[in-house]
Amino acid sequence: MRTPRRLPGLLFIAAFSMSGAPALAAGETEWLVAPYLWYPDISIDQSSGEGGGGISASDLLSKTDAAGMVRAEVARNHWGLTVDYLFLSVSDSREVSLPLPPDTSTNVQADLDLTVFEIAGFFRPSGNEEGINYLAGLRSIRAEKVLLITPPAGPTQRRDGDESVTDVMFGARYLYRFNNRWDANLRGDYSLGDSEGTWNLMGGVSFRVNDLLAMNLSYRHASLEYEETVEGETNTTTIELSGPLLGFLFRF
């Protein structure tokens, strides 16, 4: 059963991006580094068994214990390479109503550790960052979660999950430059393989302060769906993160 409630989690990200940087002379190698602050809503929904019943931890994960992301990107003329690493650890504990007997308020503690590694090459038809870029590569995801369910009149139930998946990822991004200071950027990608499908959408605007620094404000939504077997039962888990990003982009 899917519960639409979400609570925010705080995510600090260090990333690399192509947005908001001035054009270089043809043939020069481009390096970009951008620390980000991402404040997403987090939704985790799990269905179990053939009946499709389950629980939602979307109203449990409001405390970020640790978070970090680093992404490296290098480009020259038409071709480039990007490597991305993300780690997110969130947890919380509270009284919620779950479809478990007895049908009363139940204490649930939820913990999630999410690790994402991505490596992709990209092709730039224009030979620079403007216009459309095409991306293709691999995305590896590991999700470790623990649910401790304590009914008012029963013992604590523990539900563990630890799943790793590797997908083939492909996507595109687009940068439109309004003038020497402002540009708009979009990115979308999808991956499929071991998972049931993951996708990511992001769009925003960038303001170039000088030749080395630009500021970016974007909105990002990421979704992951995968199957896992816990105690002989197959569960389908969906994890979604959605929220604004603020970034500071540095170019070397």
Image (cartoon, rainbow, N blue to C red):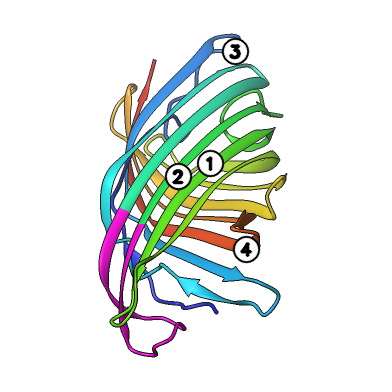
Task: From the top left corner, tell me how far across and down residue 242 is, in percent.
Answer: 43, 59
Q: Picture quarter containing residue 57?
A: bottom left
- Which kind of residue does numbered mark 2 sit on? Leu
Nearer the camera: disc 3 or disc 2:
2
Provide the secondary structure element on which disc 3 rests. loop
Residue topped by disc 1:
142
Provide the secondary structure element on which disc 1 rests. strand
Q: Is residue 174 visible?
A: yes
Determine whether label 2 and label 1 are within 8 Å by CB. yes
Determine the residue positioned at 44% across, 29% down: 16
Q: Which residues are magenta?
A: 91-110
Q: In the rendered structure, which disc, 2 or 1, sits on the residue that comes first in sequence?
A: 2
Provide the secondary structure element on which disc 2 rests. strand
Determine the residue positioned at 38% across, 70% down: 6
Q: In the rendered structure, which disc, 4 or 2, sits on the residue that comes first in sequence?
A: 2
Q: Quadrant of the N terminus?
A: bottom right
Residue topped by disc 3:
26
Provide the secondary structure element on which disc 4 rests. strand
Q: Main secondary structure of the magenta part?
A: strand
Residue 93 tag number: none
Between the C-alphas of marks 3 and 2, the distance is 39 Å
Q: Nearer the viewer, residue 173 or 233?
A: 233
Nearer the camera: disc 3 or disc 4:
4
Nearer the camera: disc 4 or disc 2:
4
- Which kind of residue does numbered mark 3 sit on? Ala
Q: In the rendered structure, which disc, 1 or 3, sits on the residue that comes first in sequence?
A: 3
Between the C-alphas of marks 4 and 1, the distance is 15 Å
Q: Is residue 226 visible?
A: no
Total marks placed: 4
Task: From the top left corner, tell me how far across and down residue 208 is, in percent.
Answer: 34, 34
Between the C-alphas of marks 3 and 4, the distance is 48 Å
